[in-house]
């Protein structure tokens, strides 16, 4: 297997992210400067993002780079999406970490490393690259979650994520080994060809164990226990990264696995997955209602959202990949805005983040723009028309209707109704009277800060997708996968 | 010659259970070394001598070194010496020792009876073949593996600092 110039060109986004990692590491070793190191990281990630978008628009042919990776429209689309989420996290971290007493620069290094794992997952078409990508995505996250090492909650969150993530990885490795023992190949396409025929029970058990590992990373319901604690403990920008980039990368590889490695042929697994989706939607939404902590509420809401996205995946058919892409795109844009406002309200980092609903009381009277952005984002999370969230949900429902998944669609509708209640609850508190002893204020010049600009952009993008989705649908169609059969 | 295969598998499972249920980290390490040696035996029986040798050198060896370092760093005076004496009661080393002797017996059995591998070992995979694969189709996986190590290093550095 030779690596020619065509292969290297196809890998450009991945190579640029890797180069950024090395350069940022050397820059930190040379001289610690928060602004300089952050700028370097953001510059490199931006270059990678522009390249991947450019390659996507030019209409890249699918190129297989060694058996491990394939660079096609699908991979480029998710690469871009992951890089956008990473960039947003980097800009948010900058304002947030100004208040951090220890060393701030490692955050950017860890962030770039984790993004490289995400990009690897987007291109993975082989179990080896799936596993390495997943580990590369998670290992830096342990340190990012526990970044303020001296505080109790982040450490607790980091430890929980570390232990449970290791267990999930063990399940997944065992599953892959079982499948390999039957198939004799680690390529998705070979596994797909095997499952298209009659599969042995051992391979099906292997497939189930792989799904357990992936469902843990996506925090679908029986495997969701870690989510609220980790989101609550993690610094706000890291929670943002967990909710967006890390989940999108895993969902991207899950979808490719389903389409190419014959997930759809494993009828029993699809049935189990629909139960997982059903439970995620119902439990995620019901538990979110009881939360008084915004980060915990968003954690439960992300469980529910990935349940909705699962509906689109389970539906299968020609629309599935596009619907999943639409849902993930709208979810990322919306979450970036929501967590962006939470981070900006908590910046610079203090004793704790502004995560109680009480902290948001009367935000509108203090910071009208910030509160307006949060309002719009919450409406989008709830899926109100003219916002991006509506387009995503519309896609998911269309795919579900095509596949006659009536009881899952019922759960989706009921879940959305419950969701509206707790999103509105937070929204109402934004406009209540200002309490006298307020603790949290976004810095006055928030809009000039890079993080403020980022949230503003996220809101504009969210409205653009909601009002005029055509260009984005075009983008999604460039990122299609060919379904078998 | 499947007897040693199943013996080594049983030893691996039992010693790993001791690792999990052991309360003292140093005792757990002792059992972990036995477990890794047993797994190395499995690799040999399955026709992967290179992987087996790596298992012994890297895992069992490196963990042994770590173990020694820990003991060296803790070994500061009379009090610690007493503590070590308390640690080294027969109750502690008996189980790992018995398991190791079992492994040794199985190993001798294989050596004396001609050294056949398990039936599942259709081909023997040596270091050259592993190298050809790592520098061929899995080249990028090796590169990403280096990034993974870097990530673990940076994470450990950040979390492990005392200041």
Image (cartoon, helix red, strand yellow):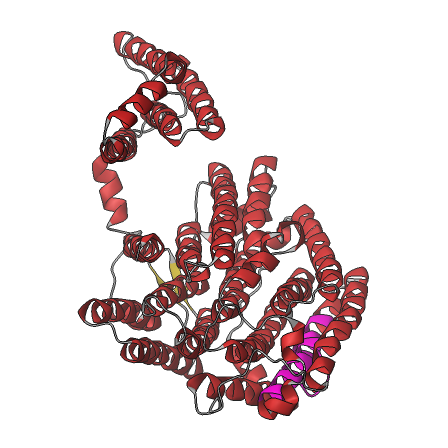
User: Over which residues does the magenta segment extend?
Assistant: A370-397
A465, A321: nearer the viewer: A465
| Quadrant (top left/top right/bottom left/bottom right) for the N terminus of chain A | bottom left
Q: Nearer the viewer, residue B22 or A197?
A: B22
Q: Main secondary structure of the magenta part?
A: helix
Above or below, comparing residue A472 to residue A231 in the picture? below
Considering only vertical position in the picture, is A385 above or below A415?
Answer: below
Report the side of A11 relative to A441 (left or right): left
Is residue A458 in the magenta section? no
Residue B54 falls in which quadrant of the image? top left
Residue A419 visible in rendering: yes
Query: Percent from the top left, x then y, of residue A93?
Result: 42, 74
Number of disc labels: 0
Q: Quadrant of residue A283?
A: bottom right
Residue A485 seen in the current view: no
Position in image of residue A48 (x %, y %):
35, 76
Residue situated in front as seen by the camera: A70 or A331: A331
Identify the residue shown where x is 49% and y is 59%: A154
**A43 relative position to A371: left or right:** left
- Residue A417 in the image: x percent, y percent? 80, 72
Residue in the picture at 38% in, 15% down: B99
* Extreme residue in the left direction: A30
Q: Is residue A466 left or right of residue B158?
A: right
Q: Position of residue A418 (x, y in %)?
A: 78, 69
Q: Residue at x 22, y 36 (%)?
A: B127
- Magenta stretch holds residue A376: yes
Residue drawn at x 21%, y 68% is: A26
Nearer to us in this view, A342 or B131: A342
């Amino acid at each position: 297997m030779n690596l020619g110039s065509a292969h290297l060109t196809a890998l450009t986004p991945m190579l640029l992210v890797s180069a950024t990692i090395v350069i940022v590491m050397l820059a930190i070793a040379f001289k610690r400067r928060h602004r300089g190191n952050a700028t370097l990281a953001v510059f490199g990630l931006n270059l990678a993002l522009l390249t991947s978008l450019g390659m996507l628009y030019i209409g890249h042919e699918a190129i297989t780079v060694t058996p491990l990776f394939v660079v096609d429209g699908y991979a480029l689309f998710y690469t871009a999406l992951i890089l956008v989420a990473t960039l947003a996290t980097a800009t948010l971290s900058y304002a947030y970490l100004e208040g951090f007493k220890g060393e701030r620069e490692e955050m950017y290094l860890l962030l770039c490393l984790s993004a490289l794992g995400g990009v690897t997952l987007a291109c993975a078409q082989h179990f080896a690259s799936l596993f390495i990508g997943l580990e590369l995505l998670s290992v830096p996250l342990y340190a990012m979650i526990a970044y303020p090492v001296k505080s109790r909650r982040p450490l607790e969150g980091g430890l929980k994520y570390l232990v449970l993530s290791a267990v999930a990885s063990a399940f997944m490795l065992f599953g892959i080994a079982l499948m390999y023992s039957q198939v004799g190949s680690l390529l998705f396409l070979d596994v797909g060809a095997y499952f298209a025929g009659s599969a042995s029970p051992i391979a099906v058990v292997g497939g189930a164990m792989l799904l357990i590992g992936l469902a843990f990373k996506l925090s679908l319901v029986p495997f969701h226990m870690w989510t609220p604690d980790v989101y609550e403990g993690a610094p706000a920008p890291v929670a943002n990264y967990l909710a967006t980039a890390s989940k999108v990368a895993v969902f991207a590889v899950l979808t490719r696995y389903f389409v190419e490695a014959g997930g759809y042929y494993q009828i029993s697994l699809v049935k189990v997955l629909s139960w997982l989706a059903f439970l995620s939607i119902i439990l995620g939404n019901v538990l979110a209602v009881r939360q008084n902590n915004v980060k915990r509420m968003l954690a439960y809401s992300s469980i529910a959202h990935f349940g909705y996205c699962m509906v689109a995946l389970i539906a299968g058919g020609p629309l599935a990949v596009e619907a999943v892409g639409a849902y993930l795109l709208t979810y990322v844009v919306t979450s970036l805005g929501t967590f962006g406002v939470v981070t900006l309200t908590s910046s610079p980092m203090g004793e704790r983040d502004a995560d109680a609903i009480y902290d948001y009381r009367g935000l509108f009277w203090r910071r009208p723009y910030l509160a307006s952005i949060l309002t719009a984002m919450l409406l989008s999370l709830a899926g109100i028309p003219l916002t991006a969230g509506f387009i995503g949900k519309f896609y998911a429902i269309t795919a579900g209707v095509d596949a006659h998944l009536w009881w899952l669609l019922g759960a989706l509708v009921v879940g959305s109704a419950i969701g509206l209640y707790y999103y509105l609850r937070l929204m109402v508190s934004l406009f209540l009277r200002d309490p006298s002893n307020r603790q949290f204020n976004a810095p006055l010049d928030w809009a000039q800060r890079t993080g403020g600009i980022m949230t503003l952009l996220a809101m504009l993008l969210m409205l653009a997708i909601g009002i005029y989705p055509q260009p984005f649908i075009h983008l999604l169609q460039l990122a299609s996968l060919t379904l078998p059969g | 010659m499947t007897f040693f295969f199943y013996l080594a598998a049983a030893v691996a499972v039992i010693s790993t259970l001791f690792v999990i249920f052991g309360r003292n980290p140093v005792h757990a390490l002792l059992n972990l070394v036995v477990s890794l040696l047993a797994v190395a035996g499995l690799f040999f029986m399955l026709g992967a001598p290179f992987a087996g040798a790596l298992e012994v050198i890297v895992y069992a060896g490196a963990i042994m070194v770590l173990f020694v370092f820990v003991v060296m760093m803790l070994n500061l005076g009379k009090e610690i010496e007493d503590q070590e004496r308390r640690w080294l009661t027969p109750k502690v080393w008996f189980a790992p020792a018995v398991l190791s002797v079992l492994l040794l017996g199985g190993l001798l059995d294989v050596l004396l009876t001609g050294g056949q591998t398990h039936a599942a070992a259709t081909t023997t995979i040596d270091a050259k073949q592993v190298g050809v694969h790592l520098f061929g189709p899995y080249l990028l996986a090796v590169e990403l593996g280096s990034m993974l190590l870097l990530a673990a290093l940076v994470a450990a550095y950040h979390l492990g600092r005392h200041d």
